[in-house]
Image (cartoon, rainbow, N blue to C red):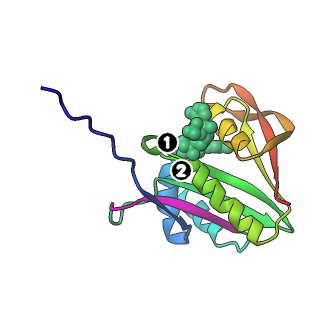
């Protein structure tokens, strides 16, 4: 007997603006990937600043479960920067990183910003691939900018996306 082919169901997500009430959950997500994770209070202080904004991804149908990805950005005097972006491991490669970054780009276009900058570890191939797909280009390098858990240093690439 042939078994029916069952198509894996794509998960559904909503992208919503970040609020200070998300701070503790953001700190938990941040801890998954960063050697020096930011605390809930640090996120809360950032989100209290009127130049800082961001978006979070929530899996639909999961009630009050916390975000599975987020991006935080700052806009000041026409120039913006990505402060951090992360997607929980179980939810990667489903377009969330891209949707979160697109939400930032739409907001910056609406606010007539000129350019968006970010720094990324030059060994972080997934993030660099995402940024290149979104139109970022390398404009500089900061030597030995990051220090890994094994004390090895790596360079930061500075990337820029024109918005006009
Ligand atoms: C970088 C990160 C946010 C990407 O999130 P994601 O939701 O998996 O990304 P997406 O599914 O939207 O991927 C969009 C595109 O980015 C590129 N990409 C993402 N992950 C990749 C990987 N592991 N390898 C190669 N390309 C990758 C691909 O071009 C992908 O498009 P495709 O799936 O159609 O090929 C995620 O890997 C992450 O949270 N990493 C840890 C935290 C981090 O490094 N943040 C950046 C600090 S500067």
**Residue 14, horizontal then vertical, whole percent:** 47, 62
Q: Nearer the viewer, residue 4 or 163?
A: 4
**Residue 55, horizontal then vertical, whole percent:** 58, 63
Disc 2 marks which residue?
96
Residue at position x 77%, y 72% in the image: 111
Would you say 135 lies left or right of 8 here? right
Disc 1 marks which residue?
92
Q: Quadrant of the C terminus?
A: bottom right
Residue at position x 76%, y 48% in the image: 118
Category of crowding for the residue at label 2, using alpha-carbon neighbours closer than 10 angstroms: few (below 14), some (14–19), many (at least 20): many
Which quadrant would residue 35 be assigned to in this image?
top right
Q: How many badges with numbers are in the image?
A: 2
Would you say 38 lies left or right of 82 here? left
The span shown in magenta is 52-61
Q: Quadrant of the N terminus?
A: top left
Q: How far apart are marks 1 and 2 (CA)?
A: 7 Å
One can see residue 35 in this view:
no
Secondary structure of the residue carrying numbered label 2: helix
Which quadrant would residue 144 be assigned to in this image?
top right
Residue at position x 71%, y 47% in the image: 134
Whether the residue carrying mark 1 lies under 8 Å from ligand 1 is answered with yes
**Do the residues bearing badges 1 and 2 touch, measured as CB atoms within 8 Å?**
yes
One can see residue 129 in this view:
yes
Specify whether residue 70 is painted magenta: no
Whether the residue carrying mark 2 lies under 8 Å from ligand 1 is answered with yes
């Amino acid at each position: 007997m042939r078994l029916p082919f069952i198509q894996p169901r794509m998960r559904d997500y909503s992208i919503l603006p970040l609020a200070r009430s998300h701070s503790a959950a953001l700190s938990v997500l941040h801890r998954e990937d960063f050697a020096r994770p930011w605390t809930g209070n640090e996120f809360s202080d950032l989100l209290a600043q009127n130049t800082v904004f961001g978006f979070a991804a929530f899996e639909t149908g999961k009630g009050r479960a916390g975000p599975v990805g987020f991006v935080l950005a700052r806009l000041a005097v026409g120039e913006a920067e990505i402060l951090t972006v992360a997607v929980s491991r179980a939810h990667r490669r489903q377009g969330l990183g891209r949707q979160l970054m697109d939400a930032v780009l739409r907001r910056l276009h609406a606010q007539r910003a000129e350019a968006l900058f970010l720094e990324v570890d030059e060994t972080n191939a997934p993030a660099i691939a995402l940024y290149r797909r979104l139109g970022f280009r390398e404009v500089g390098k900061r030597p030995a900018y990051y220090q890994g858990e094994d004390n090895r240093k790596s360079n930061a690439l500075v990337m820029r996306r024109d918005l006009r």
